[in-house]
Amino acid sequence: MGIKVKKDFVSKSKYSIKCPNTMSAKYITFHNTANDASAQSEINYMKNNNNEVSYHYAVDDKQVIQGIPENRNAWHCGDGSGVNSGNRTSIGVEVCYSKSGGARYKAAEKLAIKFIAQLLHKKGWGINRVKKHQEWSGKYCPHRVLDEGRWNEVKQAIANELASLKGGKAEAVKKETKSSTSGSKGNANVREAQAFLNSRNYPRKAKFTKLIVDGYTGPKSLNAALRILQYYGGTDIDGIWGPKTQKATKVLSVHSYSKWWTHLAQSALVLRGVYVSIDGVYGSGTKAGVIKFQKSKKLIPDGIIGPQTWKALVG
């Protein structure tokens, strides 16, 4: 008996925001959520806000809920609206309870593995159709799986489930190594941001080793941005967003600082999946990117990078 899916679709009145394009899917994208909410809470959040953030399925330890039809695109990969982007060619599956992990997350991941295998079987696809979010935009997602070094294991588990549904032998998953997820295969915008963080003399003074310019966003890149912010804010360089760092940024605004400050802000935006030009000029494109990011974090969308926006970017 297959896994039953609860359908709880976003209103058609929000299609222009959440899923404006028809889609003939080619892939399935595996995500970890950034919180410990249930599948129903994830779907309710998506349905009730007006942000361009959306996904097809949410899976927790008990159920699978569908929020967007598979023949519509969703904004879950962070790689734009091009016809060959992950947003336009893949079905997004969010695995819940990812922030803290534990028994509920393990159960949710197990159910997601079975469900993805079921989708593959239904569509006549192989395991090569499964991708992690990171492969599209460089974002460090599925973060829990990546932190635990288990992406190969998860993908093989999906292949094993698929084989059991087909009654055949499981396909061996090609192992991914650091060399297969570096260099030109990462996102070009992220590589540019990482190169900027490495480009001056201050990284050594800010107490972090130079980054691998691989185009994949991870905690090291974001922590590097925070340490640079602390260095130029004249506070302790400890890589921790604390009271002193917040106090140092209260008097700072991207509009009143030099070109490097704007470069840093633009790099941080890119590392968070908002792709703006890293040119050191706070123009309309950068302001629009800041506003988009602020809306996604439920901050006042004023286009000014104050303490709360900096905290959301690099804290």
Image (cartoon, helix red, strand yellow):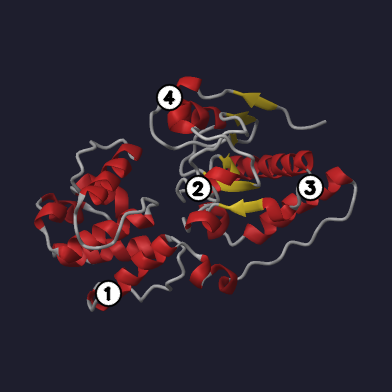
Element at badge 4?
helix
Residue 145 falls in image quadrant: bottom right
Identify the residue at image location x=26%, y=46%. 290
The mark nearer the N terminus, 4 or 3, is: 4
Element at badge 3?
helix
Identify the residue at image location x=72%, y=40%. 119
How crowded pointer 3 is (Cα within 10 Å; few <14, some 14-19, many 20+) is rated as: many
Which label lies toward us, 3 or 2? Answer: 2
Which residue carries the number 3 mark?
Answer: 161
Residue 179 falls in image quadrant: bottom right
Identify the residue at image location x=45%, y=48%. 80
- Mark number for residue 48? 4
The mark nearer the N terminus, 3 or 1, is: 3
Q: Is residue 157 left or right of residue 293?
A: right
Residue 26, given in percent of the width and then of the height, sits at: 66, 46
Question: Foreground residue, 84 or 156?
Answer: 84
Q: CA distance from mark 3 to mark 1?
A: 46 Å
Residue 162, given in percent of the width and then of the height, sits at: 79, 47
Asked if the residues shown at circle 3 and circle 2 are in contact, with their CB atoms under 8 angstroms apart, the answer is: no
- Mark number for residue 77? 2
Element at badge 2?
loop
Q: From what the image shows, is residue 219 above or below residue 65?
A: below
Which residue carries the number 1 mark?
Answer: 203
Q: CA distance from mark 2 to mark 4?
A: 20 Å
Farthest right residue in view: 167
Question: Foreground residue, 228 or 246?
Answer: 228
Kindly tell me whether residue 315 is visible in this rendering.
no
Residue 102, given in percent of the width and then of the height, sits at: 57, 46
Asked if the residues shown at circle 2 and circle 4 are in contact, with their CB atoms under 8 angstroms apart, the answer is: no
The mark nearer the N terminus, 1 or 4, is: 4
Q: From what the image shows, is residue 271 above or below residue 91?
A: below
